[in-house]
Amino acid sequence: MKLHKMVTCGLVAAASCLAMSSALATPVAWTDWTSISGNSASGVMDGINVSVTGAGNLDGVSQTGCGTNYWTQPNALDLAYTGGTVDNGPTACEQVGLNTANSVTVTFSSSVSSLYMALLSVGQNGLAVTYDFNQGFTIDSEGQGYWGNDATDGILADGGILTMREFHGVLLFDSPVDSVTFTTSPGEFWHAFTFGSVPTSVPEPGTLALLGFALAGLGLTRRRKV
């Protein structure tokens, strides 16, 4: 009977550890943009080189080094960037801006298993802006940002199309990514994006679960010896 109870407690502890690990938000390494000029931009994301090429100009100069953090979350009950699986919002003034309809290709120097894309002030009331991606994703979080909130909470259609009206939020791509292409339309005064990934030093949830089982087993062994 005692052994059965100890096994049960061990399983409960392991299950609790797994639940806690899945509920914890993940730290994200956001891109440090080192160059934004003309129709190209480049940066580094957790040791991975990020290259951006647009059919039209990329407007990052007026916002990079701006002294104002536009990645703010003014409403604690409606978090745009940390309301999902992400623990930390993008770095202040680190973003690539767009002010015309564009076709953008982003290439990574190595495959990214969990790629996040943060979006800042895309569209506005009365002007819907659409991003059409070449691969699938989910909306990880969306909410109130520096310039307000999306009146429609972002409309996601089949085929990787997202229509936004003052959207502040984070997308999570479905599978490992080497490159991603998206088109934006129509043109808008200004909106921006950046990319992030889970640092390689952060353990996967499965690893945390195994640790929970190991700790539970250790506790069981010690109690049996006593």
Image (tube, rainbow, N blue to C red):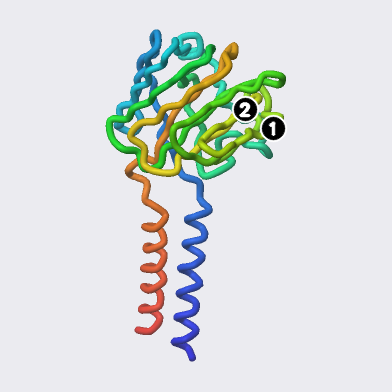
Residue position marked by numbered label 1 in the rendering: 152
Residue 170: give x, y in percent of width and height: 53, 34
Identify the residue shown where x is 48% and y is 11%.
Answer: 59
Quarter of the figure with residue 106: top left
Q: Say if 226 sits above or below 167 in the image.
A: below
Identify the residue shown where x is 48% and y is 16%.
Answer: 102
Q: CA distance from mark 1 to mark 2?
A: 7 Å
Decide which of 68, 185 is in the foreground and name it. 185
Give the residue type that dot 2 points to. Met
Badge 1 local density, few (<14 within 10 Å), some, or many (20+)?
A: few
User: What's the mark number on residue 164?
Assistant: 2
Badge 2 local density, few (<14 within 10 Å), some, or many (20+)?
A: many
Decide which of 127, 193 is in the foreground and name it. 127
CB within 8 Å, label 1 to label 2: yes
Quarter of the figure with residue 47: top left
Name the residue at the bottom extreme. Answer: 1
> Tag 1's secondary structure?
loop
**Dot placed on the residue nearer the N-terminal end, 1 or 2:** 1
Residue 135: give x, y in percent of width and height: 44, 36
Residue 215: give x, y in percent of width and height: 39, 68
Give the residue type that dot 1 points to. Thr
Work out which quarter of the rendered image holds the C terminus and state it.
bottom left
Q: Say if 171 sits above or below 194 in the image.
A: below
In this rendering, position of residue 219 left or right of residue 149: left
> Tag 2's secondary structure?
strand
Identify the residue shown where x is 50% and y is 46%.
Answer: 25
